[in-house]
Image (spheres, rainbow, N blue to C red):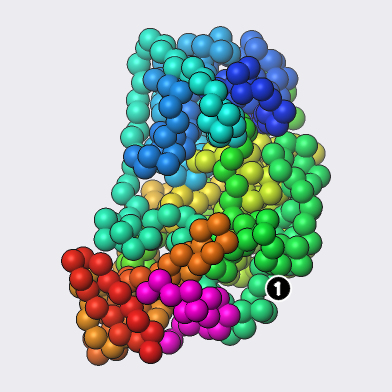
Amino acid sequence: MEDSTPILVGGGQFTEKEFNPESALPPMGIAAEAAKAALADTGKGDSIASHIDTIISIRIFPDSTNRPRLQIPFGRAENPPRAVAHRIGANPVNAIYGNVGGNTPQKYINEMAERITAGDVGVVLLAGSEAIKTAQTALRNDIMLDWQEDYEGSQEDRGLGEKLFTPHEFAHGVGIPIQTYPLFENALRQHQGFSIEEHMQQMGSLFEKFSEVAANNPYSFYGTRRTAEELTTITPENRWIGFPYPKWMNAMDGVNLGAAVIMTSVGKAKELGIDPGKWVYLHGCAEANEKINVTDRVNYYSAPAIGVNTRAAMAMAGIEVDDINYFDFYSCFPSAVELTCDELGLAYDDPRGFTLTGGLPFFGGPGNNYSTHGLASMLPLLRANPGHYGMVTANGGYLSKHSTGIYSAKPFAGKWERESPSNYQHQVDDLVSPDFTEAPAGPALIETYTVCFVKGSPDKGIVIGRLTDSGQRFVANTPVDQDLLTGMTISEQIGRPGTVSNNDGMNLFIPA
């Protein structure tokens, strides 16, 4: 083991469930509380803060989109990493504000591990948070808050990152998570050969276990235990959101949650006197993207980039999936978990389970920062069991961007070096996808679909289909017909024929 080997030495979480909006913490205040918990977890407390030379602040949801629905009129931290630094007594050389994506916590850990090994950075704090519940409560009660923060100093703002949908896709409803993930779920059901009822039972059984974990997690923002039957039964409270997902199968982003981790090198940890019992090693890491646009995917029942990057991470660690003791899969919707299991060859009822937090629908979905919670939850388990391995998968967009980390308190052997993602990204890029047209016309078949609901009532159908003659793919909406939309939730629609037409850039699919 070399002194340049990267390690994690602290992890912390913070949950603000009981609050008065006027005295509640702003987003960077929550991130700072998680950072303080991570500092304490090193065993050296605040003394570590002055040694932090790099702070990465995970981008909050209100800064992640130009869509008005997510804008919060309370001001913002103009320099998020330095707003956190100010609260914990740090003065980093590098202040980085991350780009958009639930993959970014693991992505930046991979990057920082590389930079630590190279000697470019010494002690890194990665922290993220959301205070969406406070904002929602204040807005509902006409309470005006002041979250404006201005701190001097440099900032490297990584921006929004890749554009994850086209204007044409978004015009038809693709690019909104609650309307896009159901497209994968329905395709997966049909590919597996299940009826709608059988598939609902499968999703309920999978997520019942997540809710059990959340119910026993003191950091959960929700944490209500729900049976499979409760999760799959449509009620006024558990109403349809985007078929086949009732409300309780959707990520819940109305939370006040923060999580942080601290990284350094073996040599620096020795210099700072951090107990080796606190050290957790990044044994493997990798990242890969799907074909970014949803309409360019190879199909909707697989996620090849998950398979490519998890296999690369395991190869770096020198282990196989059977060697892993703990998993925390990104779990915004059932399809994200199911497709990860499929790519790894895991049964959905694997006794190891797939979450340490309880998952985004039950623990809570703190924006881009969820996977930091998964990792912070994993650190104590690995320290208590030094021979065990844990895997964290992180997902950004619409199964668009993936990053994986494999961790263990077992020392890393040899020189730490990761393979460039460009060496294996081509395995996804080279896959053949159907041609896509924005102006389809003529007979067609449904490839996958969903029905979108507003307050429990069907609002519109989204169809991704294929032209019968050419096989070209298209995206379209269905007529707004209550009987049609309701029927699409009762019987299988994939393979159903119909006719598609284009009018001023908008496509309409009329089922036969």
> Residue 91 location in percent, x, y?
48, 11
Q: Residues within 10 Å of mark 1 (few under 14, many from 20)?
A: some
What residue is disc 1 on? Answer: 201
Q: Is residue 49 above or below residue 26?
A: above
Q: Main secondary structure of the magenta part?
A: loop
Residue 306 in the image: above or below residue 391: below
Write the residue at 35% across / 25% down: 156
- Above-or-below relation of 319 to 103: below
Write the start and end of the magenta stretch as one range. 479-496
User: Could you tell me if residue 130 is visible in this image?
Assistant: no
Q: Nearer the viewer, residue 245 or 407?
A: 245
Q: Position of residue 500 (x, y in %)?
A: 28, 80
Q: Does 481 sit above or below residue 263?
A: below
Tell me the residue at 43%/27% (across/down). Answer: 73
Name the spot of residue 49 as percent of width and height, x first: 58, 14
Q: Nearer the viewer, residue 62 or 95?
A: 62
Q: Amino acid at mark 1?
A: Gln
Label count reads 1
The residue nearer to you, when weighing 315 against 16, is 16
Relative side of 453 to 173, left or right? right
Q: Residue at x 30, y 85 (%)?
A: 499
Where residue 179 sits: x, y (%)? 46, 61
